[in-house]
Amino acid sequence: MIKNPRVLHKAQQEVRQVFGDDSGLHRLKYLDMVIAESFRLHPPGPLLAPRENRDQRVELNSYDEVPVNSYVIVNAWAINRDPRYWTEAERFFPERFMDRSIDYTGNDFQFIPFGAGRRMCPGNSFRMAIVKITLANLLFHFDWTLPAEQKNIDMTESFGVTLRRRYPLRLIPTPYRHIL
């Protein structure tokens, strides 16, 4: 969000208007969209667990068939950025989820940051609660800026079993003055 000040300030406004206690978390709709867009562009596990085709030959997209006893690895990172499913797929634009349900259950195969089916991340609901409350608290209690010498953020990613930024993120938190 620090690379998109408009998004940062809009999410902060929403959090600060709603947040009196944890009971307001369900009303943070824009924050939900920001989290979904972040996971769409930067899934924690870019490659899903390998799956073995044990039963029969299967037709899969442009491949004629996947033979029995072969393994398939799904690239969630590529699916979440596929321009056939996402307008301006490389752009960070949380509002794309405004008129679209945010489905982390793996039923929407255009958006699978945590897998799908029986092998989906078992801590899915716990993870969402932790991410949402942590981010809401960070937005509520602090204003965020880049260090003075840094004018831009390099979002280059290092690929591997997990997806991480190539260069560390350094930000300056300034405590927000609450009027209680």
Image: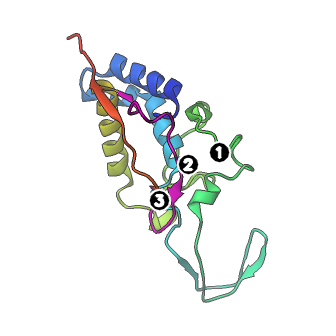
Q: Residue at x 25, y 15 (%)?
A: 177
Which of these two is toward me, 171 or 27?
Answer: 171
- Identify whether 106 is placed above or below 58: above
Instruction: Kindly indicate whether the residue at mark 1 contacts the one at mark 2 (C-beta within 8 angstroms).
Output: yes
Reading the image, the residue beneath label 3 is: 163
Q: CA distance from mark 2 to mark 1?
A: 7 Å
The numbered dot on residue 159 is none
Does the magenta segment cover residue 161?
yes
Indicate whether 135 appears above or below 115: above
Residue 166 lies, in percent from the top left, at 47, 56
Give the x, y percent position of residue 103. Answer: 52, 46
Left or right of 131? Residue 161 is right
Query: Type of residue at label 2?
Result: Leu
On the image, numbered disc 1 is attached to which residue?
90
Residue 21: which quarter of the image? Answer: top left
Q: Residue furthest bottom?
A: 69
The local crowd at label 2, few if under 14, some if 14 to 19, many if 20 or more residues have their Cα within 10 Å, is many
Label 3: how many Cα within 10 Å (few below 14, some 14–19, many 20+): some
Residue type marked 1: Glu
Q: Which residues are magenta?
A: 144-164
Q: Earlier in the sequence, mark 2 or mark 3?
A: 2
| Residue type, label 3 | Leu
Q: Which mark is residue 41?
A: 2
Q: CA distance from mark 3 to mark 1?
A: 16 Å
Chief SS of the magenta region: loop
Q: Marks 2 and 3, Cα distance to the nearest angstrom? A: 10 Å
109 or 88, nearer to the observer: 88
On the image, the x and y values in percent for residue 4 come to 52, 31
In terms of secondary structure, where does tag 1 sit? loop
